[in-house]
Amino acid sequence: MALIRHRRHPNLRLSVLEPSERNRNFSLSFCRSSPTTIKPAAEDVITAADLENLAVLGHGNGGTVYKVRHKTTLVTYALKVIHSNADATTRRRALSEISILRRATDSPHVVGFHGSFEKPSGDLAIVMEYMDGGSLETALADGTFSEERLKVVARDILEGLASLHERHITHRDIKPANILLDSKGEIKIADFGVSKLMCRTLEACNSYVGTCAYMSPERFDPEAHGGNYNGFAADIWSFGLTLFELYVGHFPFLEAGQRPDWATLMCAICYGDPPSLPESASPKFRSFIESCLKKESQDRWTAAQLLTHPFVSKDPETH
């Protein structure tokens, strides 16, 4: 659940399709191992009584995110609360998010998980690391990113994605609003509400979830791209669009200020050529973005491969 903030492009309000609008062939599904009830793990020792609310950080998707403080340790956390009256899909996604965060919380570039609990009211609560620097979306409001800054951002996000993909987890909603940073400059992937734990490495992941603007061509039109695909490649496409946007300051497939609709966006992504960086981009950065935005998912580089690309690699032999 991304925090609600003023958007820098009010016209870019592209949301997930409502269930009635989805193709019935692409239903949302999770692995059978996904929890149906909250079963606190040994580390889930934080309770509602331990926390005091400091501020509301945002609302959305059937819940509220609070800035809270532990009364004893004085540690600050972000507390996501899914309200008891939220619809079944929202609550199921919250349970999946808890399961995924438990598996991925040891990654230095995934937002930390500190426990979960259910209130007597039926509200579900997830205790997470508090990132005090906002998101890349809010950071972009202060100006576009230089290539030097993007090298650091790209490397950190890729290390997070590589860690997730090694655990067979696809994020499915990579975008500037879901990449958080803190005052120390650390960058972490957040918001796993529509993420999926893949039961098998190449299990299909063709449901219409995630923010439409950042969806890959094969997620809009799976049949035109072989029907099945490696779901991890969709994260790489979204990652490439995210970096592109941070560099140019607006969503890549549209001119600055252009008002999109779903059909226009789908046609641009599925039938148009991948967007091209402006002439100011260096050859290395251009090559890096092109490696992410291949129309065919099997042609995109993996997160592990991209970490070896000369644009981000720390190995001098690759430069």
Image (cartoon, rainbow, N blue to C red):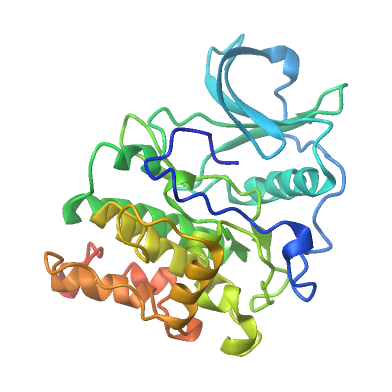
Would you say 212 lies left or right of 37 here? Answer: left
Q: Which residue is at a point 28% across and 71% down the rendered structure image?
A: 288
Is residue 301 depicted above or below 208 in this figure?
Answer: below
Residue 175 at what x, y percent from top left? 46, 53
Q: Nearer the viewer, residue 149 or 86?
A: 86
- Examine the rendering and report whether any part of residue 319 can be seen: no
- Examine the rendering and report whether any part of residue 251 can be seen: yes
Would you say 265 lies left or right of 182 here? Answer: right
Residue 10 at what x, y percent from top left? 43, 43
Q: Which residue is at a point 57% across and 58% down the rendered structure image?
A: 171
Q: Quadrant of residue 201?
A: bottom right
Residue 174 at what x, y percent from top left? 49, 56
Q: Which residue is at a point 30% across and 43% down the rendered structure image?
A: 140
Residue 93 at what x, y percent from top left? 73, 49
Q: Quadrant of residue 37?
A: top right
Q: Nearer the viewer, residue 208 or 178?
A: 208
Is residue 85 depicted above or below 92 in this figure?
Answer: above
Q: Which residue is at a point 79% across and 43% down the rendered structure image?
A: 91
Rendered-image quadrant of the C terminus: bottom left
Is residue 183 depicted above or below 71 in this figure?
Answer: below
Rendered-image quadrant of the N terminus: top right
Q: Nearer the viewer, residue 17 or 210?
A: 17
How many circles with numbers are drawn on the protein?
0
